[in-house]
Image (tube, rainbow, N blue to C red):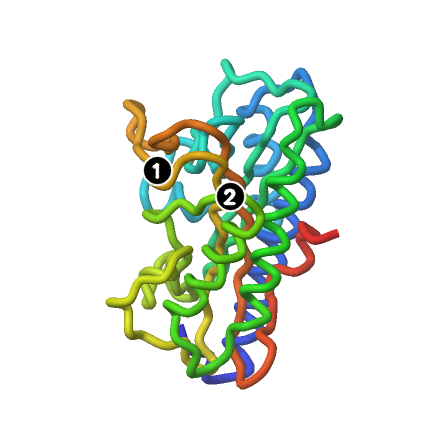
Amino acid sequence: MSITSESELIGMQRISEVVALTLKQMRNYAQPGMTTKDLDNFGGALLKQYGAKSAPALSYGFPGWTCISLNNEIAHGIPSDKKVLQEGDLINIDVSAELDGFWADNGGSFVLGQDIYHHQPLVDASKKILRKAIDHIKGGVRIAEIGRLIENEANKAGYKVIKNLTGHGIGRQLHEEPSEIANYYDRLNLKRFRKNSVVAIETFISTNSTIANTMKDGWTLVGNRGGFVTQHEHTIVITDGKPIILTEMNEVWD
């Protein structure tokens, strides 16, 4: 969407605060021994408390309030009573929701407890690359150039990017134009970021894989070459200068 009034900005700020605080509180709540379903139920209760509706459930009939992906899962992980969190797990939580006709999206990967499997460098690379990408976004910048930046920074750090998962426009629906804000340079994408538009920017930084494939459950995504992937995502408003980061209170950078 494009922000055209103060009321629209306020609406986006409200729902962005909801998803950001839900993500932050879910991350703090997670502990070894609980299931991903326990964690999702906690997140669902928070969304309900805030008066918001789960975007994946509302839009696509997703079987959970939030997406929780564990270890080798990249995204869209279904919360389950059979998935028990363990010390050192690589966890990704993606929270998106709707409130009063406005939609926002954010996500983040983190290591649970001690980093016994050495996932933290991959997590840190994803956070750093997202920050750098957002710092370079303003009205008129080619979307493909941000993809080039993300891929180049990933390669410098010794990683790859997932090429078929992308950021997207957001605001009045979960997914809007621009439909693809890729993590690599797509020379065929001639679109540019527009001032006052709202987008969800996300990184998918990988140790081995470059493509995400859907598992038999119809939702969960895993890499074509195995390994691990970290994702971080913010909803932002594009300006002539530095973007307004609507979901910054999720504290994924702290």
State the quadrant of the N terminus.
Answer: bottom left
Q: Earlier in the sequence, mark 1 or mark 2?
A: 2
**Residue 88 as seen in the image, left or right of residue 143:** right
Q: What type is the residue that disc 2 sits on?
A: Tyr
Q: Residues within 10 Å of mark 1 (few under 14, many from 20)?
A: many
What count of labels does the image hold?
A: 2
Q: Position of residue 248 (x, y in %)?
A: 66, 60
The residue at which mark 1 appears reads as 212
Identify the residue at image location x=33%, y=60%.
Answer: 180
Question: Where is 137 relative to 106, above or below?
Answer: below
Question: Where is 121 relative to 146, above or below?
Answer: above
Q: Quadrant of residue 14?
A: bottom right
Identify the residue at image location x=50%, y=32%.
Answer: 228
Question: Where is 115 relative to 149, above or below?
Answer: above
Q: Is residue 82 visible?
A: yes
- Helix, strand or loop at label 1? It is strand
- Disc number lying in front (1 or 2): 2
Identify the residue at image location x=58%, y=32%.
Answer: 91
- Helix, strand or loop at label 2? It is loop
Q: Position of residue 54 (x, y in %)?
A: 46, 45
The residue at which mark 2 appears reads as 159
Marks 1/2: CA distance?
15 Å
Q: Position of residue 174 (x, y in %)?
A: 39, 56
**Residue 97 as seen in the image, left or right of residue 247:** left
**Residue 160 as seen in the image, left or right of residue 218:** right
Q: What type is the residue that disc 1 sits on?
A: Ala
Q: Is residue 101 visible?
A: no
- Residue nearest the viewer, comparing 54 with 154: 154
Q: Position of residue 219 (x, y in %)?
A: 34, 32
